[in-house]
Image: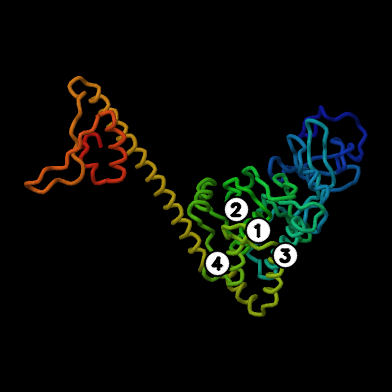
Amino acid sequence: TNGVFHSEAVTGAQRHCEMSSPGASFVQIKFDDILFYENCGGGSFGSVYRARWISQDKEVAVKKLLKIENEAEILSVLSHRNIIQFFGAIVEAPNYGIVTEYASGGSLYDYLSSDESEKMDMGQIMTWAAEIARGMHYLHSEAPVKVIHRDLKSRNVVLAADKVLKICDFGASKFLTHTTHMSLVGTFPWMAPEVIQSLPVSETCDTFSYGVVLWEMLTREIPFKGLEGLQVAWLVVEKNERLTIPSGCPKCFAELMRTCWVTEPKERPMFKQILSTLESMSNDSQLPQQCNSFLHNKAEWRCEIEATLERLKKLERDLSTKEQELKERERRLKMWERKLIEQSNSPVSSSLSPLHFGPSSPSGQTPHIVEWPRQQLVPVCISWFSHSPQEKDRIPLHLL
């Protein structure tokens, strides 16, 4: 064994690669042609290791998989400067894996969390924003088959040695020949509302995610930091909340992010439009000064993001409290219901009983009396009190 995979799958000492079986379109790489080093992170549905492809004397990344599904097939048809280069796949059960180029700079997420990211200026952000957009435009419009990534986020964008960004991890991706349904994959803070709801999706679900990655580069903050995934899902879908764009953010960047986050998928820009917008921004002579001033004054606007996070957390806590109150109210009404049923089944109370509905009658007038069978009393009470909360006072206090 090499310490990463089981050794049972090794069928011989010969180390070479070969074309895959008929019907498959990628190179098969022998398991024993790979020398594994350290784990360098986790991708969708598998862990990623730095390794050496021995016969080719090449440093590679290997993503360990439980089985080979569509990721190798998708990667095998892709070729673009801003898409991770695919070399082949290990298909010897149970040691399945995807072999790609190794990006020594790590993920964009890790870079943005490092001290080095404090040196970022507008030029760097514009370059990277364009590189990601070019890669996504290729997937949607220029690849041999349209591909929707479905899990675009800063962890799935890596830095090559020359700091060129490359989109990786296609474990959640699908060939896109038409608008399609998708399972709940991806990570909530980056996910479009229709993805969260498992509604039909199109290419623009990736546009929404791109807007979040752009926000990460501009703020160097974690999206919806401190909130659980399902809390984020509820806020994005039910409350139509979006990440806070600080007031000092240059207007062109702010507008681009807002258009990416529009709820209606058809109203979001395609990546061809995004590239055109970025080109126009690069010709704005005043933007570099505005952007660099924004980036270097984080202490002044970070409080805006933190204030929004506190508001969202309070909103979620208030919702939780309200849910508890509703559950308690339901419990009390059920107890009241049981008591009424017990009374209706007793010999003394089996006859019709007068109920007084509405406000008390003025002095000297006949009160509004309704005769109602006790068997129908329970649903009437529940619906009545739900529509007339003030009437709850008529229920004995010990039952409330």
Q: Which residue is mark 4?
A: 298
The Cα atoms of the two marked residues, 2 and 4, are separated by 27 Å
The Cα atoms of the two marked residues, 1 and 3, are separated by 11 Å
The kind of secondary structure element at disc 3 is: helix
Q: Is residue 323 left or right of residue 271?
A: left
The kind of secondary structure element at disc 2 is: loop
Circles 1 and 2: CB atoms closer than 8 Å: yes
Circles 1 and 3: CB atoms closer than 8 Å: no
The amino acid pointed to by label 3 is Lys
Circles 2 and 3: CB atoms closer than 8 Å: no
- Figure quadrant of the C terminus: top left
Q: Which residue is mark 3?
A: 272
- Seen at 70% across and 77% down, the residue is 283
Q: For this rendering, which residue is in front, 127 or 363?
A: 363
Residue 111 image-quadrant placement: bottom right
Q: Which residue is mark 1?
A: 207
- Counting the numbered discs, the total is 4
Label whose residue precedes the other's in the sequence (2 or 3)? 2
- Label drawn at residue 189: none
Label whose residue precedes the other's in the sequence (2 or 4)? 2
Circles 4 and 3: CB atoms closer than 8 Å: no
- Local crowd at mark 1 within 10 Å, few (<14), some, or many (≥20)? many
- Local crowd at mark 4 within 10 Å, few (<14), some, or many (≥20)? some
- Label drawn at residue 192: 2
The Cα atoms of the two marked residues, 4 and 1, are separated by 26 Å
Residue 359 percent across, percent down from the top left: 18, 46
- Up-down: is 50 above or below 2? below
Q: Nearer the viewer, mark 2 or mark 4?
A: 2
